[in-house]
Amino acid sequence: MDPGLLSTMQDLGRRGYQHLGFSVGGASDVRSLMLANHLAGNPASSAALEMTVLGARLRFSGSALVGVVGVEPEVLLDNRPADASKTLVVRPGAELAILGMAGARTYLAVRGGFDVAPVMGSRATDLVAGIGGLGGRPLERGDRLPISTGLPASARRRVAPEFWLRPKGLIHVRFCPDRGGPALERERSLLTDRVWEVGSELDRTGIRMVGEAIPGRRGQILSEGHPPGAIQLPGNGLPIVLLGARQTVGGYPKLGVVGPVGLAALAQAMPGTRVTFEPVDSDEMALESRTWLAALSRPELCTEECG
Amino acid sequence: MTDPVAQIVPAGPGALYVRVGEGMSEAVNDEVLRLSAAIRHGLPVGVFDVVPGYASVYVEFDPLRWSFRSLARAIRSSVIRFEPKPRGRLVRIPVQYGGEFGPDLSDVATRNKLSEEEVITIHSSCWYRVYFLGFTPGFAFLGGMDPRIAAPRLARPRLRVPRGAVGIAGEQTGVYPVESPGGWRIIGRTMVRLYDPRNPPGVLLRPGDLVRFLPVPESSA
């Protein structure tokens, strides 16, 4: 009924084709995607609807179990406030509206998942390639989202308290300094000394930081692949933290890589949120990331059954 | 045989680089493509992507299946055994140069003190190697352009460069597979689809292919 500002179908991204120039894409905040799927009784990697800043309003023709996860999304089910920390039970003909959110992205998952054919192994929408999700484009008014039905009902679940997301005015983001490229020690100190703000672009390719520019004449580097979380330093001295929909190769120098925990937090940070960057070593980052990802992969580790 | 792998470094918990030599050259590209093929061939499970660049191979993997150290070790051993791949294909791409299709052709000519015909002849007289693909689906980073027709990017990029546009930026040449903003100087256009979303993945070129541009007279469009 109302598609919201930028709503696209996303899963964990399209893997295996970056060497042909296809971005991985997928959910900008993988944590919220996976939690929404657990509430809906889906595999953690199922496709959901990613809504940006302004949520969608949908009418369900059949019954459904739904998970809506973001940062304190305001949800109405048939015009009555609904508790989005838990699985929502939607009856045929009901209207579900996501009115507002305290974070940048909210995910809506439905039990059974969306019944659209995957393209190159994924249902993620790639707006540049024009493939995936709803024919490679955002949700529009009047669209019908087919849902796979016929699955037995799953238990209702609730997000575990330690995985709750709250809005924050200041976030500390952990990153691994880049050791293999050109020496950028001075630039890296300025990155970690300064307080940055999230820019207003809300672009799926990367989060642009605003603040006192890091000076210096730096050339480009030879183009190469780069991970989500990579902290690019373009000529204007304002860092960009790459997200899933980044281009597959880049020629800007990199200061380091933000880990998945920090990247999920950054992907939820509204414009103006203050950010500091904290360096950690590779081993510590790897341990923290694996623990976090393992917990999010299993419903019993990040959600609880409820009545 | 000496260890061909210059340096393997982590890039966050789920990625690493295999760095190969310095600079842009066919010899470095040969090694990049050999390593890419070796890694892709030897280590399928939990390795998501293997992406060649000018002088590195970028590898993305599942951090729940691989640690940096274990994957680096596996890469070293798989790479030593691997035989070089056979050469890629020869691909000819017809191009309508100049006129409405090449708004920057005369500019490129003037900057290099050449006639437009000379620019076209130089641009279409050699085989370009596809070093790797990236930036958009189907975009080929081509090596081997003659520096006599080099020209800097536009100071203000165009908001829309049409699909199939053939351009020059610095000492590089390339073709836009999809319409996108861009600052390359456009000297012609091809109707050949370097990326066709109707047939996924629909990408025409592969790293290692050799590409040659064929001038097409306007009257036969």
Image (cartoon, helix red, strand yellow):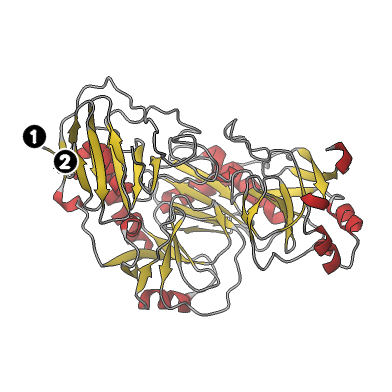
Label 1 and label 2: CA atoms lie apart by 10 Å
Quarter of the image containing the C terminus of chain A? top left
Residue B25 is marked as none
Residue at image mark 1: A307
- Image coordinates of residue B126 in percent, x first then y, are 84, 50
Between residue A253 and residue B201, name the one nearer to us: B201
- Among the 4 quarters of the image, the one containing residue B64: top left
SS class, disc 1: loop
User: Which comes before the other along the chain, label 1 or label 2?
Assistant: 2
Q: Which mark is residue A86?
A: 2
Number of numbered discs: 2
The front one of A122 and B180 is: B180
- SS at mark 2? loop
Q: Residue furthest left?
A: A307
Amino acid carrying label 2: it is: Lys
Left or right relative to B148: residue B175: left
Q: Which quadrant of the view contains residue A207?
A: bottom left
Q: Amino acid at mark 1?
A: Gly
